[in-house]
Image (cartoon, helix red, strand yellow):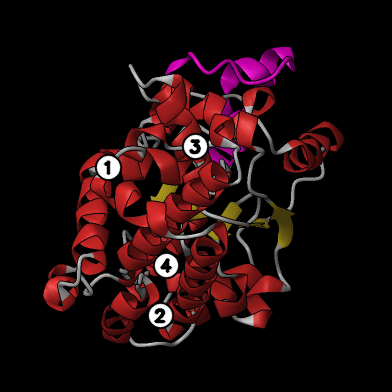
Amino acid sequence: MLLLKDIKGQNNAVKYLSNCILSGRIANSYLFTGPEGVGRASCAKAFIAELICPENRESKRGACGRCPVCKRLDAFEHPDVKWISPGKNASVKIDEIRAARELLNLKPFEAARGVCVIEDAHMMTVEASNALLKVLEEPPGGSLIILMTAKKEMLLETVISRCAEVRFQTLPYEVTREIIRGNAGGINEETAGFLAYFSQGSPGRAIRMMNEGLSERKREMISLIEEIAGGKDAAYMNWDTGDKDRLLDDLEMMIMFFRDMALEKEGLARIVLDKEVVGTGMYRFYEKYSAKDVYRIMGDLIRLRVDLAGSINPKLVAQVLPEFLR
């Protein structure tokens, strides 16, 4: 498991948590805010390890990451740590909060304190949020609660006000690429660079997309654009409009395609990110377009993605796409 000192690109968060440990001023509850896939969960594990690792309690040299306690924590199997992860588009329900409260009220089995971590805390139901609020108002002695969210605005203000906020940020391109290469065996430098840019500084998101078949999805997007550009208005009907997050990723990929086309037309082929698509039918079709036309298409796609992230109906996105790509 990663130790706190090994967390990359989150210097402010690591420094704050390290100072909490050194001073002995551990809050009962923390709120880890910021984008997904930038190290919040790894940092939470590392922070907890510092507090419960027996070797650290004896030596004061930091968690070891190797002892049975650290290994159980890393595998989400530690009896004193309840880790709630609702999964994509799922809710955190009141029964899970009640179970966490029961654990925190018990005497820890082997750790110095009971711990509860809630990923995607903004997915709590109203009942779960109110139940958690009661725990935050009267936390069991020595307990620790860590909430994580990429959508802080969806949490109750009363929940936010009772937590010490730790802010996480997207990672620099170079750091993101380095993490991707270190965690995705066999990936080449160019693919890692594409993923680092496409994920917008989120290594976790990049690795998830790769595991979900990003390469195949890229081929599908190229074929879709080729069909639409070639005049097949019905092509968009094959576009999966049932998953808004996936649609957002698809539009981001299209924006990258046209960004690279614009760079080529400006004589900057050396900094094109995705050289695998150069020479495809999609690229050949847009050879007759000027750089200004390509920038116009890219701008339209960016606005479409912004609208989709807001409240626009995903089916409408598919309907207007053909007129934007010609």
Q: Is residue 217 magenta?
A: no
Instruction: Choose the circle earlier in sequence order: 1 or 3.
Output: 3
Residue type at tag 2: Thr
Secondary structure under the numbered disc 1 in the rendered image: loop
Q: Quadrant of the C terminus?
A: bottom left
In the image, is 181 to the left or to the right of 321?
Answer: right
Instruction: Choose the circle earlier in sequence order: 3 or 2.
Output: 2
* 26, 138: nearer the viewer: 26
In the image, is 20 to the left or to the right of 96?
Answer: right
Do residues under tags 2 and 1 come within 8 Å of each other at their CB atoms?
A: no
**How far is the residue under mark 3 from the one under mark 4?**
45 Å
**How far is the residue under mark 3 from the one under mark 2?**
41 Å
The magenta segment is: 42-69
Instruction: Choose the circle earlier in sequence order: 4 or 1.
Output: 4
Q: Give me the disc on residue 280.
A: 1
Q: Give me the disc on residue 125.
A: 2
**How far is the residue under mark 2 from the one under mark 4?**
10 Å
Which residue position is annotated with label 4?
A: 97
Identify the image quadrant of residue 49. top right
Q: Position of residue 245 (x, y in %)?
A: 36, 66
Residue at (39, 51) in percent of width and height: 287
Residue type at tag 1: Thr
In the image, is 57 to the left or to the right of 193?
Answer: right
Instruction: Choose the circle earlier in sequence order: 2 or 1.
Output: 2
Query: Mark 1, residues whose alpha carbon is within 10 Å: few (<14), some, or many (≥20)?
Result: few
